Image (tube, rainbow, N blue to C red):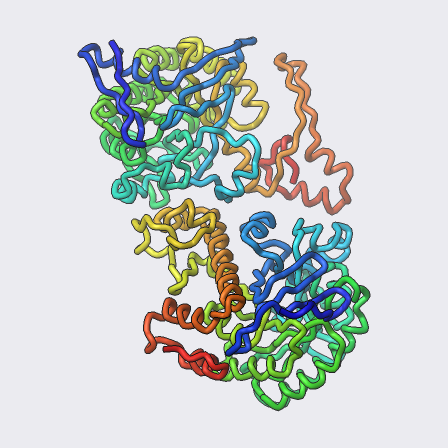
C-alpha cells in the first residue's frame, strides 16, 4: 500500500491512491508520510521529542513539549506580523479558533486560497480548534447532530457537514474534529459523559469520511478528541476508540475550567495518555499556568495553548517568575517574586492598588 | 544649494532646493537627535507613544521627528519621573527627534472650565481634579524636563472662529509670553524654543505679531491659531501672509495641518513642518488613507475585497494584508487599528517624501497637478480654495 505524492505547480501536495485497499490504512499511511513525531526521551512520564514535516510545504518542525500561538480572528491579540517578529521563540504552530472565524465562511469560500494566506501567515502551520479558550461556551446547546459554536454574531449550530464545509474553506494543517465537550460546567452525569463520547466518535467517523472526499483537505491532519467528562470508564473508552481511527493526533478535551477536582483531572489525564499511541502528539486545551503545564507534561501531554499570556495582559499584568518545579508535589517550592515582593517594597499606595487588582491574578505575574 | 545656516545653538537649516515657481522649498534641519529632511510631517504621539505601534516600527517607517504632548505628559506621569527616565527620549525609547507642544491647545480643547489671565492658564485637571496653573515658565520647565529637541512657547490660544478684541488681546499676550518662555528656557544649547505666530484671521493683527516675533532670537517659527475649523479661503491667506514675513533661513511649522491636500498646498505656500492627529486617529476609526481619498475598511463593502489597501504602497500592512482581512479584523481586534495606523503613517511620510523629491528634482508644480488629479479626478472637483492658493504662487492646475 503506497501513496504517491504529487506536487502541483507551486502548490501543496496532493495524494493519489495507487491501489485499492482499506481506506483506513491508506489514510493513516498518507498522514504518517506527512507529520512525524520522533521521541528522543521519556523521563518520568515527560516526553521530549520533535514533530517534523509540518505545514503545507512539509518543512516546518515543532519541539515537544511545546505550545501553540494563540490568535483571535487569525491575529495574535494586539500584535501584527512586525511586532510578532520582535519576539523570540514564537511558536511554529498557530492556533486558530472556529468561533472567531466562523463568520468568514462565505468570504473564505470566495477567497479560495485558505485561511493562512488570508490572515497574512501563508508559511505558518495552522491548527483550527473549535472554541476560543478565552470565552467558555454556555452549556446545554449540543445535540446528537450538532455542536454549537459561539461566534461574534452569536450561536451557530454545526453539523458534521457544515463543519467540514468550513474546514474546506479554511484549509488548516491540523483540525480539531467536531466534538461534544460540554461536560465542564458543574456535575456531569454518567449519561452525559457517555453522550459526549458517543457523539464525538460519531462526528469523528463522519468527518473523516468527508475529509476523504475533500481534495482541499488531503494534506490536513484530523485531531481526534477525547471526551468523557470525569468518568474514568468513559475516558478510557473514548481514548481507545479514538485511537482506532486514522487520526494524526489527540486532544484531551473537557479538562478546562474549575469544575473537576485537580486530583481527578490529573489521574484521568494519565489514564488517557496511557491508552494512546506514542507516535502521535497529545494536545490539551484550557491549561495555561506554568505549574499546571508542567503537571500535564508529567502525564504525557505534548502540546498546549498560549492564551494564558493574553489573559494576564488583559488584566494589566506582566508575567514574571522564576520557578523551581519539584515533581514531588509535597516538596514543591515556588519562588513568588511577584505580588509579595511588590507588597514588601511598595508604598502603602502600591499595596492598596495591588489588593484592588483582579482577583484572578496568579503568582506568576506582577501588576 | 546653500550652506547650512545656524538658526540657534541647537538647530541649523540648509535649503537644499527651491521650487522656482512657488514658495516651496526642500530643506535639511539638523537637530540634536539628528537630521530631519523637510517638508516633514510629524506624527503625533500624544502620551509618549504612537498609539498602537512601537517606537521601532515608527522609526522603521522613516519617521525622524514626532510629537509628544506637554499637557498629557505633564499630568501623567509628570516631569519628575520622565526626567529620571532620561527625558522623554529615554522614557519612550525614541532615538530620533522630538517636538513637544506647550500644552496650550489642550487647555482650550480639552478642559471645559479654563481661565486665561496674564499669569497663565488656570484649569481643573481631568486626571485628578486638582486646580492647575499653567504659566509660560511652568510649560517651559516641563518641556525642559522632557528634553525635546523642539519646544513650543506657551501661547494664548483662541479658536480661529472667534472674532473681536479677544483675538488682539491673545496676540499681544502671546508675544509677552514668548519673552517669558525665552527667559525661562534653561537649556537653549540643547533645546530649540519656537515662537507661535498668532493674530487669528486678521491680516493686520497677524502682520503685527510677525513683526514683533521675528525680532526675537528664536531658532524657528510656528504658524498657530489656524486649522481649527475656519473657512479654507481665509486659512490659506493667513498662511501665505505669514510665510512672506518669516525669515527664509529658519523653519516654518504650520500647526495642526495634516490632510493631504492641505499639506501639498501649504508646502507650495512655503511651510516646512506639519503635525496632525488626523492620520493616526482616522486609522483607529477604521479609515485607510490612499492617494485618491480614504477607504473606510470597516464598511461592509470591503468584506470580500481581497486587494491590499493600496497596490502601490510598500508599507508592512499593504505587503501582507488585504482589505477583506482588515475588515474582518476590525470588528473585534485592536490589531486592525495598529495595522491601519502603520499604513496611514506610511502614507503621510511617503507623501512628504514624494513632495520633497519633486522639489529637489525641480518638478514640484507638475507633482501638484498630478496629485490633484489623482485625489479629485477632474477639475470640477478641485476645491476652489486650493486652486486659488496654488495660483497665488504661480501653480496653475490644468
Determine the image quadrant of residue A162: top left
Along the line of sight, the residue nearer the viewer: B290 or A276: B290
Work out whether residue A245 or residue B46 is closer to the camera in this orientation and state it: B46
Residue in the foreground of this view, choosing between A108 and B64: B64
Residue A315 x, y percent position in the rendering: 57, 42
- On the rendered structure, is A68 left or right of B199? left
Q: Check the picture and name the quadrant holding the N terminus of chain B.
A: bottom right
Residue A331 seen anywhere in this rendered image of the structure: yes
> As displayed, is residue B197 above or below residue B42?
below
Residue A39 as seen in the image, left or right of residue B195: left
Residue B380, image x and y in percent?
A: 32, 78
- Residue B281 shows in this picture: no
- Indicate the quadrant containing the C terminus of chain B: top left, top right, bottom left or bottom right: bottom left
Q: Nearer the viewer, residue B60 or A275?
A: B60
Residue B215 place in picture, x, y as percent = 74, 82
Q: Residue at x 74, y 47 (%)?
A: A349
Query: Vertically, is B223 above or below B151?
Result: below
The residue located at (69%, 51%) in the rendering is B91
Q: Give me the residue at 75% from left, 69% from top.
A: B8
| Relative to A233, residue B349 above or below | below
Amino acid at each position: 500500500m503506497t501513496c504517491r505524492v504529487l506536487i502541483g505547480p507551486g502548490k501543496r501536495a496532493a495524494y493519489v491512491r495507487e491501489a485499492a485497499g482499506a481506506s483506513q490504512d491508506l489514510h493513516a499511511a498518507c498522514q504518517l508520510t506527512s507529520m512525524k513525531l520522533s521521541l528522543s526521551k521519556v523521563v518520568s512520564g515527560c516526553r521530549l521529542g520533535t514533530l517534523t514535516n509540518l505545514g503545507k510545504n512539509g518543512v516546518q518542525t515543532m519541539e515537544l513539549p511545546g505550545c501553540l500561538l494563540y490568535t483571535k480572528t487569525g491575529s495574535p491579540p494586539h500584535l501584527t506580523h512586525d511586532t510578532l517578529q520582535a519576539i523570540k521563540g514564537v511558536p511554529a504552530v498557530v492556533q486558530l479558533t472556529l468561533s472567531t472565524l466562523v463568520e468568514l465562511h462565505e468570504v473564505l469560500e470566495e477567497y479560495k486560497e485558505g485561511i493562512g494566506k488570508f490572515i497574512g501567515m501563508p508559511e505558518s502551520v495552522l491548527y483550527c480548534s473549535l472554541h476560543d479558550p478565552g470565552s467558555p461556551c454556555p452549556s446545554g446547546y449540543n445535540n446528537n447532530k450538532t455542536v454549537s459554536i459561539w461566534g461574534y454574531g452569536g450561536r451557530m449550530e454545526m453539523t458534521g457537514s457544515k463543519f467540514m464545509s468550513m474546514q474546506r474553506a479554511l484549509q488548516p494543517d491540523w483540525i480539531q474534529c467536531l466534538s461534544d465537550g460540554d461536560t465542564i460546567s458543574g456535575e456531569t452525569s454518567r449519561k452525559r459523559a457517555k453522550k459526549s463520547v458517543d457523539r464525538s466518535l460519531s462526528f469523528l467517523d463522519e468527518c473523516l469520511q468527508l475529509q476523504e472526499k475533500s481534495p482541499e483537505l488531503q494534506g490536513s491532519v484530523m485531531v481526534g478528541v477525547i471526551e468523557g467528562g470525569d468518568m474514568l470508564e468513559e475516558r478510557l473508552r473514548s481514548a481507545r476508540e479514538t485511537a482506532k481511527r486514522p487520526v494524526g493526533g489527540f486532544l484531551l478535551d473537557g479538562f478546562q475550567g474549575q469544575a473537576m477536582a485537580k486530583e481527578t483531572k490529573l489521574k484521568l489525564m494519565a489514564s488517557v495518555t496511557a491508552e494512546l499511541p506514542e507516535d502521535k502528539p497529545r494536545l490539551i486545551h484550557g491549561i495555561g499556568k506554568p505549574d499546571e503545564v508542567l503537571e500535564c507534561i508529567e502525564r504525557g501531554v505534548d502540546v498546549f495553548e498560549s492564551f494564558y499570556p493574553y489573559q494576564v495582559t488583559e488584566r494589566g499584568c506582566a508575567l514574571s517568575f522564576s520557578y523551581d518545579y519539584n515533581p514531588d508535589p509535597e516538596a514543591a517550592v515556588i519562588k513568588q517574586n511577584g505580588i509579595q515582593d511588590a507588597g514588601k517594597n511598595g508604598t502603602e499606595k502600591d499595596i492598596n492598588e495591588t489588593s484592588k487588582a483582579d482577583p484572578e491574578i496568579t503568582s506568576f505575574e506582577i501588576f | 544649494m546653500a550652506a547650512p545656516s545656524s538658526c540657534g545653538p541647537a538647530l541649523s537649516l540648509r535649503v537644499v532646493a527651491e521650487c522656482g515657481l512657488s514658495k516651496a522649498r526642500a530643506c535639511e534641519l539638523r537637530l540634536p537627535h539628528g537630521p530631519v529632511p523637510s517638508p516633514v510631517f510629524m506624527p503625533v504621539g500624544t502620551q509618549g507613544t504612537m498609539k498602537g505601534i512601537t517606537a521601532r516600527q515608527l522609526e522603521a517607517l522613516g519617521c525622524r521627528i514626532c510629537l509628544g504632548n506637554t499637557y498629557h505628559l505633564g499630568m501623567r506621569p509628570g516631569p519628575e519621573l520622565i526626567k529620571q527616565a532620561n527625558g522623554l527620549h529615554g522614557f519612550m525609547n525614541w532615538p530620533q527627534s522630538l517636538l513637544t507642544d506647550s500644552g496650550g491647545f489642550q487647555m482650550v480643547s480639552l478642559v471645559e472650565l479654563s481661565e486665561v489671565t496674564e499669569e497663565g492658564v488656570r484649569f481643573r485637571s481631568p486626571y485628578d481634579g486638582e486646580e492647575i496653573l499653567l504659566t509660560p515658565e511652568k510649560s517651559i520647565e516641563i518641556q525642559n524636563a522632557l528634553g525635546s529637541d523642539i519646544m513650543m512657547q506657551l501661547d494664548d490660544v483662541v479658536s480661529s472662529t472667534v472674532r473681536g478684541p479677544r483675538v488682539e488681546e491673545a496676540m499681544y499676550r502671546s508675544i509677552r509670553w514668548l519673552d517669558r518662555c525665552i527667559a525661562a528656557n534653561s537649556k537653549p544649547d540643547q533645546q530649540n524654543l519656537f515662537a507661535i505666530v498668532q493674530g487669528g484671521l486678521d491680516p493686520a493683527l497677524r502682520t503685527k505679531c510677525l513683526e514683533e516675533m521675528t525680532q526675537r532670537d528664536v531658532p524657528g517659527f510656528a504658524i498657530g491659531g489656524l486649522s481649527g475649523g475656519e473657512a479654507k479661503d481665509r486659512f490659506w491667506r493667513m498662511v501665505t501672509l505669514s510665510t512672506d514675513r518669516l525669515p527664509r533661513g529658519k523653519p516654518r511649522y504650520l500647526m495642526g495641518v495634516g490632510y493631504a491636500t492641505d499639506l501639498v498646498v501649504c508646502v507650495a505656500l512655503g511651510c516646512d513642518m506639519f503635525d496632525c492627529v488626523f492620520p493616526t486617529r482616522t486609522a483607529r476609526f477604521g479609515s485607510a488613507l490612499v492617494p485618491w481619498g480614504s477607504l473606510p475598511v470597516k464598511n461592509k463593502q470591503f468584506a470580500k475585497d481581497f486587494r491590499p489597501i493600496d497596490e502601490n504602497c510598500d508599507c508592512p500592512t499593504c505587503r501582507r494584508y488585504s482589505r477583506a482581512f482588515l475588515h474582518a479584523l476590525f470588528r473585534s481586534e485592536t490589531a486592525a487599528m495598529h495595522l491601519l495606523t502603520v499604513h496611514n503613517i506610511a502614507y503621510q511620510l511617503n507623501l512628504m517624501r514624494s513632495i520633497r523629491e519633486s522639489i529637489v528634482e525641480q518638478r514640484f508644480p507638475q507633482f501638484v497637478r498630478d496629485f490633484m488629479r489623482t485625489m479629485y479626478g477632474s477639475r470640477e472637483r478641485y476645491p476652489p480654495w486650493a486652486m486659488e492658493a496654488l495660483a497665488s504662487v504661480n501653480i496653475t492646475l490644468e
